[in-house]
Image (cartoon, grey):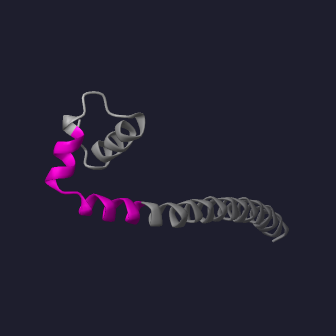
Amino acid sequence: TSRDKAAAEITAASCAEEEKSANEKTIATKAIADDAQRDLDEALPALDAAVQSLKSLNRNDIVEVKSLGNPPAGVKMVMEAVCIMMEIK
């Protein structure tokens, strides 16, 4: 019986260590998830605004940009962003 008690105490101590480790990992994981959610909450309004801007584009806007021989840097950046969002290479 004393052997069983000793084995039970060893097992209990091992379980306590594993539980402590699991709790620490849970806390770290929650912090990462919360950080990611904050970043997502910050980025979503910009994405929604960009999508609304894309929806307001018409054919004439595209033709105008195409007619520019060497568009300004801002126009190039916006067009690259649109291509990325629309998955156009």
- Along the viewing direction, whichever of 13 and 59 lies nearer the viewer: 59
**In which quarter of the view is residue 35 placed?**
bottom right
- In this rendering, the answer to whether 53 lies above or below 66 is below
* Residue 4 on image: x %, y %: 77, 68
* Residue 54 on image: x %, y %: 28, 58
* Residue 72 on image: x %, y %: 38, 34
Name the residue rendered at 38%, 65% in the picture: 48
* Residue 80 on image: x %, y %: 33, 39
Which residue ends up furthest to the top in the rendered image?
70
Q: Quadrant of the N terminus?
A: bottom right
Name the residue rendered at 24%, 34% in the picture: 68
Name the residue rendered at 45%, 64% in the picture: 44
Q: Is residue 88 left or right of residue 9?
A: left
**In which quarter of the view is residue 55 placed?**
bottom left
Name the residue rendered at 16%, 44% in the picture: 63
- Along the viewing direction, whichever of 76 and 20 lies nearer the viewer: 76
Give the main secondary structure of the magenta stretch.
helix
Q: Which residues are magenta?
A: 47-65
Is any part of residue 88 visible from this angle? no
**In which quarter of the view is residue 15 placed?**
bottom right
- Along the viewing direction, whichever of 10 and 20 lies nearer the viewer: 20
The number of discs equals: 0
Is any part of residue 46 visible from this angle? yes
Magenta stretch: includes residue 32: no
- Along the viewing direction, whichever of 18 and 28 lies nearer the viewer: 28
Q: Quadrant of the C terminus?
A: top left
